Image (cartoon, rainbow, N blue to C red):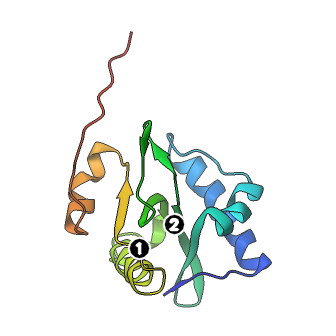
Amino acid sequence: MIKNNLSKEELQQIVILDKEAHKEIKWWNLAKKSNLVKTNSIGLLFLIIYKKKNIGFIRYIFRKHYEDYPVEKSTIFLEDLFISKKFRLKNLASESIFKSINLLRNKYKLSKVKLEAPLRLKDFYEKQGFEPNHIVMTKKL
């Protein structure tokens, strides 16, 4: 189950989950609580609940520009997706993406979701219906 329109207590649970993600995933950028609260005005925040436990979250953000290019108003970016380690491999991330995207399409009339993800997650997101449209490459100096 996913839930948005979160209470202060549910938002605090997301702060705790965000800290968990930051400890576990080396590239994860820890969000300030104020930025998570601000998400409600610049995007959408969903709490992922499984068997009455708060186990993860999805954060979508509206952007006016992406890499110096203007972004259509009907586009939102999947900024963060996190599921606590012991609840992974239960299809909960896929189910949460599916439900949240349906809500974005039907309730908010959005037509496109974009995201950036590590290369190791490419197959996962392709299974969710995302298509790669560019590649970012890095060379250490």
Q: Identify the residue under disc 1.
A: 110
Is label 2 or label 1 in front? Answer: 1
| Spot occupied by residue 137 in the image (x, y as percentages of width and height) | 29, 28
Q: Residue at x 38, y 80 (%)?
A: 105
Q: Quick one: label 2, few (<14), some, or many (20+) residues within 10 Å? A: some
On screen, residue 94 above or below 85: below
Q: Amino acid at mark 2?
A: Ser
Q: Residue at x 44, y 58 (%)?
A: 77
On screen, residue 50 above or below 111: below
On screen, residue 137 above or below 57: above
| Spot occupied by residue 57 in the image (x, y as percentages of width and height) | 54, 69
Disc assigned to residue 141: none
Front in this rendered view, residue 78 or 56? 78
Q: Amino acid at mark 1?
A: Leu
Quarter containing the C terminus: top left
**For the view shown, which residue lies furthest in the top direction?**
141
Secondary structure, mark 2, is loop
Q: Residue at x 52, y 53 (%)?
A: 63
**Badges 2 and 1: C-beta atoms under 8 Å apart?**
no
Front in this rendered view, residue 101 or 13? 101
Q: Identify the residue under disc 2.
A: 84
Front in this rendered view, residue 3 or 21? 3
Q: Could you tell which of marks 2 and 1 lies nearer the N-terminus?
A: 2
Location of residue 59 by image quarter? bottom right
Q: Residue at x 52, y 90 (%)?
A: 51
Q: On the rendered structure, is 39 left or right of 25?
A: right
| Spot occupied by residue 81 in the image (x, y as percentages of width and height) | 47, 62
On screen, residue 83 above or below 31: below
